[in-house]
Image (tube, rainbow, N blue to C red):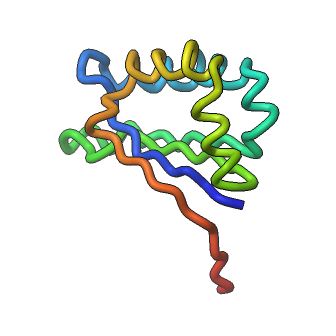
Amino acid sequence: MIKLIVAVKRNPAMSPAEFHAYWRTVHSGKVRALDATRRYVRRYVQAHTLDAEYVGGEPAFDGTAELWFDSVADKDAFYSDADYLATVRPDEMVFADLAASRFFVTSEEEVEL
């Protein structure tokens, strides 16, 4: 199992509230609607920066997304899928500042406590 983790910076044209509402509803709906999501994505998690973090200034990121895949090949297949490229990719530019966001592929190693 591999995870793509994205540290998401919002589009500066959106307020934090607009960003979080859009990401939670509109964008996640587009991701869920894809056949490619059902084929390749095992889990999709959004973590939203707490409202209190905005009180002291602009946080480094507005949230993180985790997308879980069985393999790097499945990740690549998802991100090259025609429906993803036509529907989801353009939508990412609506709510996210992709140049300021960070993407990295990981494998999880649980640490026993």
Task: Please name whichever residue, 70 or 110, is drawn nearer the observer in this view of the structure.
Answer: 70
Q: Residue at x 50, y 22 (%)?
A: 89
Q: For the point 27% across and 35% down, which residue is it?
A: 99
**Residue 96 placement, left or right of 88:** left
> In this rendering, is residue 100 above or below 27?
below
Q: Position of residue 30 (x, y in %)?
A: 64, 17
Taking the view exactly as shown, the residue that stands out farthest to the bottom is 113
Who is closer to the viewer here, 8 or 36? 36
Q: Which quarter shows the N terminus?
A: bottom right
Q: Quadrant of residue 101?
A: top left
Query: How many numbered discs?
Result: 0
- Out of 71 and 54, give the one closest to the viewer: 71
x then y, percent, for residue 26: 57, 15
Residue found at x 25% / y 39%:
55
Residue in the image at 63% along x and 19% along y = 82
**Image quadrant of residue 49?**
top left
Q: Residue pushed farthest left?
A: 57
* Quarter the C terminus occupies: bottom right
Can you give x and y, in whole percent of width and height, for residue 27 in the image? Answer: 56, 20
Q: Is residue 19 left or right of residue 21?
A: left
